[in-house]
Structure formats: C-alpha cells, structure tokens
Image (tube, rainbow, N blue to C red):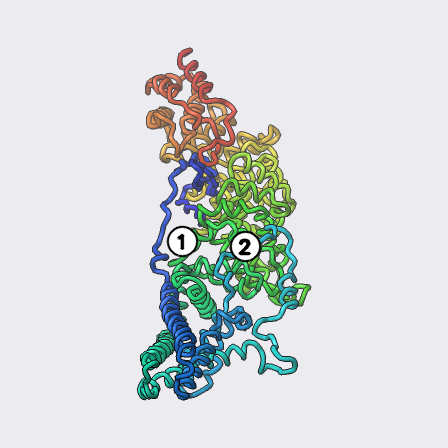
Amino acid sequence: MKMEQEQPKEGDTSIGLDIVQLTNRGGSSNFVASQLSFEPQSESSDPPPISRNSSSKQAPEKKLTLFAFRLALLEKSASGLGTLAFVWATVVLLGGFAIKLEGKDFLFVTIILVIESTRIFSRSHELEWQHQSASTLGGTGTYSFRALQSSSRLFFRALSAAVNPFSVLQRDGDRSRRPARSNRAVGSSRDDSAVESTAQRIWHGPDVPLIPYAGWVFMSKNISRVLSWLQLLSALACVSLSLLRLIQQDYGNVEQDSRNRKPALNLFYALALAEALIFLMEKAYWTWRILYCNLLETVSRECELGEGGIVSIRRFFYDAYAKCIDGSVFDGLKMDLVTFAKELLNSEFRDEQLIGAQVLEKFAKSAKFADDTLRKIGTSTWVIERLVEMLNWKNPGEEEIRRCAAEIVSKLAGKRTNVLRVAAIPGAMESISSLLHGGKTSNMTPHEMSKRSDAADGTNYDFSVFNLLGLLILKKLAADHDNCWKIGNARGLLPKIIDLTSASKTLLRNDRAPDSQIRTVKRSLQVVKMLVSTTGSTGKFLRQEISEIVFTVSNIREIIQNGESHMVLQKLGIEVLKNLAMDDNAKEKIGSTGGITKLLLSSFLRPGFTEDQNLLRNEAGVTLAVLTLESINNCDRVLKEKEVLEQLMGALTEPVLRINASRILRNLCAYSRAECSDRIGRLTAAMPTVLKSIMEAKEKLLEVSIGLTTQICKLMDPDEFAEALRQASIEETDLVEKLVRTLEKYTFPEIMVPRIRRFVIEQAIWMMKSNRNSIQLFKKFEMENLLGSVAETTSQLECFHIFSGSVGLIQHSKPLSSLLETALDLMIDS
C-alpha cells in the first residue's frame, strides 16, 4: 500500500508524519495513516473497497487449454479407432480368415497392423525413455520451431511443426498433480550448491546416450525425433494402403464359407483409413493453429509475459495436452497459468523454478491480472512459504529466481489481505533481512560495485536491486502495526536498515550518482520513518531501539548537511528526527549530536523560493518545536546559536515560518534555564508584533500567537506590557474584546485549535493579576459567563501539547479546570 503524506498548505505546520494504526475488527486488518501533530487527527476505520477484476474470465490461456482439449479429443478418437481396427484385424481377420485371405490382403493387413502398432505404441506418453527426452524448458518444443526452419521449403516447415510438438509431450503422470510441500524450513540457511549438485549427479534426459560410443546420433532426444517422423509416415502409409484396397475391392473369390470376408476387410480398411485421417487432421489442425495463427505467440502477448514468455506458454500448453491425454480429456481444461507457475516453484530444477517465478512476477505486476494472481497466491500458504524461502537463495546462478520471488513478495505485501500472511511465515523477517546488504555498498562508485562478486564463482551480483526490493517489502509490511513489532524484533534487521541510510558527501554531491543508490537511501529513510512513527508500546520500543543505534542520527546529519541537491532525502531525515523526538531519551540524543541543532535552524531560517524549499523549512521548524518542548538542554542548545533569537523574532513576520517560529519561541520562554533569563528577556521586543498577530490572525496563527504572548508576559511587568500595546497601536479594551470573542467563538473544544481556550484563559489570568482594571474590562464583556460555559465543556483534547493521531502524548502541567478556577476566583474577588 502506498503511503502518501498530504502536502501542507502555506502556514500549515502540522507535523506531517504518517502513523500506522491497526484496527482489528472481525479479523480484518484496517490501515489508517495518522500524523504526529499539534492537533489531533480523526481516524477512519472504513477500509477502501477492494477492487476485483474479471481476469479469470478473460484469461488468455483458455485458448491453449481449449486447443489442447480439441487436439486430445482427435488423438483419443484416432487411438480408439486404431485400437478397434487392431482388435478387428487380429481377432476376426487373422483369427477367422487367416488361411482363406488372399496373399495380397494378408500382406496389406499385416503391414497396416505393423505400422499402426508402431504409430500407436510410439506415442510419447507410452514410452518411458521418450518421457525423458524432453528438455525441462521445452527444448524439443523449441526445436520444433527452430531445428527445421533452416529449410527454405514451406512444406517442411509445416511438416516439422505438425510432427515434432507431439513428441515433446513427455510428462510423467504425477506432473499433473500438485507438488508435495517443501520440507525445507522457511528462513533457514539454504545450501547454495544443492540444486547444482543435483544437476551434476543425474543425467539430463535429452542427453542420455543409448548406445556406447555412438555419439549424438543415438541420444534419446534424437531417437524421439525419429519416432515422431515415423508416426507421420505410418499414418500416410496407412491412408495409402487402406484407400488403395478399398478402391480395388479385389478380395478374391467369395466361397460359401468365406462370404463375410469382404465386409470384414472393408470394415478393417475403413477403420484404418478413418483413424489415419483423423490423426492427419489433428496434425493439420496443429500446424494451422501453431504455425500460421501463431497461437502461442498470441497468448504470450496477451498474457504480457514479455520476450521470454513463449517458453513458459509452450511449457504450459504441453502440460495441458499431457493431462488431456494421460487422464480425462477434460483434465487440461482445469489448468491455468497461475496454478501451473505455482507448481513449478516447488520443482527441484532451477529452470522450472525460473519459469514459475517469472510467470508469477509478470502477472503480479500486470494491471490486468494482478488482483486474481495475488489472491490465488495469498490463499496458498505453501506458495508464500516457498517464495519467502527463495529470498534466502544467494547462489549467483539463482539470482534471477531470487529477484522474481522478491518482486512477488513485494506485491503480496502491498495487499491488506496478504500482508499479515507474509509476515506470519516463520523466519519471514530473517529472509527479508537477507536481501539487504550494508550501506557501504550504496556509497561505492559503479566501478567499485562492479568488482564486488560472489566468492563462489566470481559472478557479479547486483546488490542494489535486492536492497531496493527488501526495503520495499519492509515498507509495505510496516503499514501494519503488528508487523512493525516483528521488524523491530528480527535479529540484526534494524541495524541493516539504518546502515542503508548512510550517504557519503561524495554521493550526495555527485550529480552523476547512480539513481539506485539515491533510491536506496530514500527508501530506507521511508522505512525508518514508518517505524519510528508507530503508536503505542510498539512505537515506544522501536524509537528506543532505533535511537540506540549509534549511526542513526549521524547518518541523518550527513544527509541534512550535504544533501542540498536532494531535498526529499533531507525532508525524510528531518521527519525521522521529529518522530524520534517523541521519546525523551531519543530527544536528548538528537540534541546532543554535534551540529544537529545548528543544521535544523539553518534549514528553518534559510530563505525559501520554491514550494519544496518551504516544505523543508516547515518540517525543520516543526522538528525544532518538538525537540525544544519540555527539554531544558535542547533549549540551551538553541540559545547558544549566534543571533538565533533575533532571527526567530524576524521569522514572526514571514507567512511560511511564523507559526513554527511562535512555537519555538514559546518553548524557549517556558523551558529555558533561569540562567538564560537575560537572553530570553530580549524576546519582549517581539511583543508588539505578536499582539498585532492576535488582532489580525485566525485559527492556528491566532492560537500560537496567544500562546506565545502568555509566555512573553511572564518576562514583563504591567508597564512594559502597556508600552507594547501602545507600540502596536492597540487599546487594552480591544485586546480584551478579542480574547473574549475568541472564547465565545470556541464554545466547544476545536480539533484544529485544541489549546486556544487554554491560552486565552492563561492570558486573561495574567492580565487580571497584573492590572485590576482589566478585571472590569473582562466583566464588561461577560467573561464570567463564558468561563462557566467552558467549565462545562472541557475535554481531554485540551490537556495535551501534541498528538499522535488521536492519542495525546505530552500533557500540560496544569489541567484546564485549575486555570478556570483561578480565573473565576479573580473575577469574583474583585
């Protein structure tokens, strides 16, 4: 599932981190993206509708199974007639009329029986040694279209296409049955040479030499071709002989005791002719559909299998035909490409595994077939186990199989119905972890990467592809709350993810850096961002684990410092810091990492000319606001920066920065040490600007402006406050009226401005305490009645500084009810 963050509008500084919530009702997983922000976010539990297409009804492979069914029908009809003719000849003719048959008919019947016996019993499904002559990749089928194409005569092209394909239908009877479930433990270490060793210790069927020292002439695959030609020649001979005798009708003198000889011979010749003609019709139908109509190529194209898809389609067709021949003629109609590919995954032969993996990958990535394919894979636990097991295969010869398996798993993890099934496979996280290779490789130059090779045979191995796929799988799995916990508990997985966030200065400032390296850093940051934004005890655990990895903050610092050309990476890194700061210990580690505070201030205060730059400035401002919230040490670190207060006060007039600048300044006033009071005292100079904002602003800006005023007022005496009002050209009566009207507007707590009523009451208390005349002004505008109304509508919404989704995180030190009592007491006592 693709997680997208809504882009904030100008002036909107809600912390934009995706938070993953899992609502489990009735066993279904609902994914809700919420945000860490200064305002609570509503969370909808209604899942989006599941799209379903009609790919099963539109399956192109139905053309192949129907073709196989029709061919098998003709083949069985021909075989049935041939068998009947054989029985009739042996029992009736040779048994009853053997002595009285003319020499010519005896010879013709004998020749027809021999050649028909040769044709029937040379069928590929009945000779065990011919079963073994087929290549596992449909090699003889490939030969059917390649070996004789060198001939310039169309007749021989058609003839070879008509004959040889039947010789490749050499499947074992149990191939049509579902393969046994693999006994290998998923996630366990796999012997990379297992398949290669098997291949070396057994004969490859097509290459078996039948006669010693005979060379290639007597190999099984060549004998198979000879038999295929014999089938065609025998059929042609049968037609010629049978038709000749039916035309001649010279069966000799009919005697009293042999008057049935003529009809018996006619019936035999008719059966033999019909059988041979049906067989030739089958061959002609094959030739027309395969060679002239290009059925295999058409189905491959409609299935979107790409250039190599013809091999998979040919192999599928052979299996469908074999099922129709070996069992019921309807058995092949039950086959489909997805089930076929699933079965091949469990093969012990690498090329068969590759066919299955490639077909499933193409279908899983196809807009037309993806839903149906992923649904069928997702309901087969043994298939998911096999795919997850393949993620561990590190033999260079199995690189393509491993890549296809990773692609399929990434698509499975993107479906809400399958995401839990993938993670539930024992050892799944460890298998996914095996796809990731250290971030040091992501910083290599292409020349250095080319030198990395597998120690087994020196073959180059593309680590970047597997890094991206592994991170993509983790990104999709992290959309589920329970999976985040599994990711955090997988041994060695979090350090690998953090290692991939490493980006050197050379990489970040290289305009010609490979896109795959930048994408790896980006995707790893996205995964970390999702993990650290998780809610509940799982989120707390993940933030602690990730913050304890010593490279986490330093890697992000390098990205912020050197990634001017990659603002997306900078923004992701800052978002990670923002969410890590929810943990008090992590907040301290971030602040204590050299240069982080300075870099965030620089990112926040630097001029912005584009929307992307302003989004980055906003994110840096929100992160600073979270870092300084209730953190004395981080406030000290901010104040140590040169002229920071002046720059922050100047930002109060910039539309893009003023909301977050107000929040940062408020935190500096509220949580700085007493020793910093002299520097903080300079903030009183910003009071006129803030008062003007109160009179002009609305909603969020109004809320943060009032909140900042409440803290600056603590640094001022009444006379200084009156001077600030004068400089802002604001009468105290106007300010009181604005505060009262604000409280009147928000009769109930408001999600967009959850603290505004609290800040209004705090400001009113300070004004009434500092100047008794202010009490009368508040009474004039009926403030007392409004306070009573607020007391009846208070909620937990108004008790927190920030929120993770709909959950409050950091609570205010004083409850709102206490502030209401203080304000009411001041008004009553006067």
- What label does residue 371 carry, if any? 1
Give the residue type that dot 1 points to. Asp
Image location of residue 607, percent across then percent down: 48, 50
Proximity of marks 2 and 1: CB atoms separated by less than 8 Å: no
Q: Quadrant of residue 86?
A: bottom left
Between residue 510 and residue 113, name the one nearer to us.
113
**Mark 1 surroundings: few (<14), some (14-19) or many (≥20) residues within 10 A:** many
Disc 1 is placed on an element classified as helix
Residue that sits furthest to the top in the current view: 829
Q: Earlier in the sequence, mark 2 or mark 1?
A: 2
Q: Is residue 35 above or below residue 185?
A: above
Image point (49%, 81%), residue name: 147
Between residue 473 and residue 266, name the one nearer to us.
266
Q: Determine whether, in the image, residue 666 is placed left or right of residue 300.
A: right
Image location of residue 41, percent across then percent down: 42, 36
- What label does residue 180 carry, if any? 2
Image location of residue 598, percent across then percent down: 58, 45
Image point (61%, 50%), residue name: 185
Between residue 675 and residue 594, name the one nearer to us.
594
Give the residue type that dot 2 points to. Ala
Q: Is residue 35 above or below residue 367?
A: above
